[in-house]
Image (cartoon, helix red, strand yellow):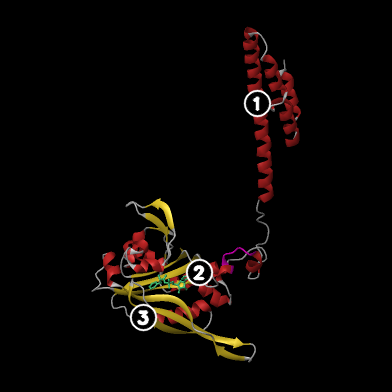
């Protein structure tokens, strides 16, 4: 019968993974020495078989345990070796050629700094929201055709009332939450990812960044909004911009508008400065009385405005990028060209 002591001493001599594999083949594999011995026992008389079978089983158990311990030892060695290799050398200079912010992060951080300096609270909110937060709290009844304006991505998980949770389709889904959390007067911004089930093209992605501004106070009017938006866009785009307000429909504002921007560009062919085309950059409006009511606010006392900017499109304007999908498709050539 196979000797445990001998097998263990053989295992002892094993120094690497290849030798361990070899050991396994010789002793423990289904065609290895141990199983061969089990096979031979099948024809032994019952009593003798019982005794030898038990002994061999014990040898198998002990040898397997010893083998596994050694295997574990090699695995840990391998993991430690990898960890060692992956260790970040903090003495290395974090120079520009090895890291850079994504352009979206850069513009978002810029926007956050500008907003903080203007006294705004910055809050990220949650990306997974209830249908109430995304629709009903901002005056979009679930039966309203407006819900179809956003082709929403639904999750299997449900909220407390049994409704499926969704990925927020706009940062306006945070309005009710912000009012409840900070109460009034309120000046807050929500930068973050939003999701829609879109057909993708150069200016439409399924995951894109928005930033929501919400201002509620006494006697707030469109004039406050107009003044603020022109200053803000010029600061964010690093250019002097002209803004244009067009009527726009959003169920959560009344009146609602869309804002386009244009700015001076240099035409290489004519070698002259000229104005760019108008580009829609955000949706805005005076917060609808129903939104205030839903959050428990007396709309005869308080008023406010809100607007939501597409950060991805804003970044495209600021950095002259033709297609917003470049921001998120992970192409290192793109990322490195801005490092
Ligand atoms: C909204 O999402 C409203 N919540 C904005 C708003 C807030 C209006 C507060 C009134 C008051 P809209 O669907 O137009 O509106 O999106 C706002 C901006 O997000 C657009 O102007 C655009 O810049 C950007 N955007 C919309 N869809 C996409 C997309 N698929 N990919 C990239 N950017 C997008």
Q: Are marks 2 and 1 in contact (CB under 8 Å)?
A: no
Q: Distance between the residues labelled 2 and 1?
A: 57 Å
Front-most of residues 47 and 27: 47
The image's mark for residue 108 is: 2
The kind of secondary structure element at disc 2 is: helix
Q: Please provide percent x and percent y for residue 253.
A: 33, 74
Q: Give the range drawn in magenta.
A: 326-331
Callout 1: CB less than 8 Å from ligand 1: no
Secondary structure of the residue carrying tag 3 is: helix
Compared to 93, does 162 lie above or below? above
Q: Nearer the viewer, mark 1 or mark 3?
A: 1
Q: Looking at the image, is 305 positioned above or below residue 77?
A: below
The quarter of the image that holds ligand 1 is: bottom left
The residue at which mark 3 appears reads as: 224
Q: Which of 339 and 260 is in front in this view?
A: 260
Query: Which of 129/25 is in front?
Result: 25
Residue where numbered disc 1 is placed: 64
Query: Which residue extends farthest front?
Result: 43
């Amino acid at each position: 019968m196979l000797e445990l002591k001998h097998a263990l001493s053989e295992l002892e001599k094993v120094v690497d993974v290849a030798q361990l594999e070899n050991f396994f083949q010789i002793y423990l594999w289904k065609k290895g020495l141990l199983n061969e011995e089990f096979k031979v026992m099948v024809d032994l008389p019952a009593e003798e078989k019982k005794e030898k079978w038990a002994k061999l089983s014990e040898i198998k158990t002990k040898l397997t345990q010893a083998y596994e311990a050694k295997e574990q030892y090699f695995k840990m060695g391998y993991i430690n070796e990898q960890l060692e290799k992956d260790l970040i050398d903090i003495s290395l200079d974090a120079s520009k050629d090895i890291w850079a912010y994504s352009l979206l992060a850069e513009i978002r951080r810029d926007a956050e700094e500008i907003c903080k300096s203007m006294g705004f609270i910055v809050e990220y909110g949650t990306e997974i929201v209830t249908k109430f937060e995304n629709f009903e709290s901002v005056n979009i009844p679930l039966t309203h055709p407006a819900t179809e304006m956003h082709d929403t991505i639904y999750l299997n998980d449900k909220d407390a009332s049994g409704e499926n949770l969704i990925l927020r389709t706009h940062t306006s889904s945070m309005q009710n939450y912000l009012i409840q959390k900070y109460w009034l007067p309120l000046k807050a911004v929500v930068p973050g990812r939003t999701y829609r089930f879109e057909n993708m093209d150069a200016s439409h992605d399924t995951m894109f960044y928005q930033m929501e501004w919400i201002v509620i106070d006494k006697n707030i009017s469109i004039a406050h909004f107009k003044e603020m938006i022109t200053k803000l866009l010029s600061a964010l785009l690093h250019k002097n911009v002209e803004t244009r307000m067009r009527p726009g429909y959003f169920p959560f504002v009344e009146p609602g508008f869309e804002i386009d921007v244009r700015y001076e560009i240099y035409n290489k062919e004519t070698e002259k400065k000229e104005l760019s085309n108008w580009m829609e950059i955000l949706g805005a409006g005076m917060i609808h009385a129903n939104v205030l009511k839903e959050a428990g606010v007396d709309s005869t006392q308080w008023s406010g405005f809100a607007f939501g900017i597409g950060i991805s499109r804003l970044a495209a304007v600021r950095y002259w990028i033709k297609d917003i999908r470049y921001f998120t498709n992970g192409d290192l050539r793109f990322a490195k060209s801005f490092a």
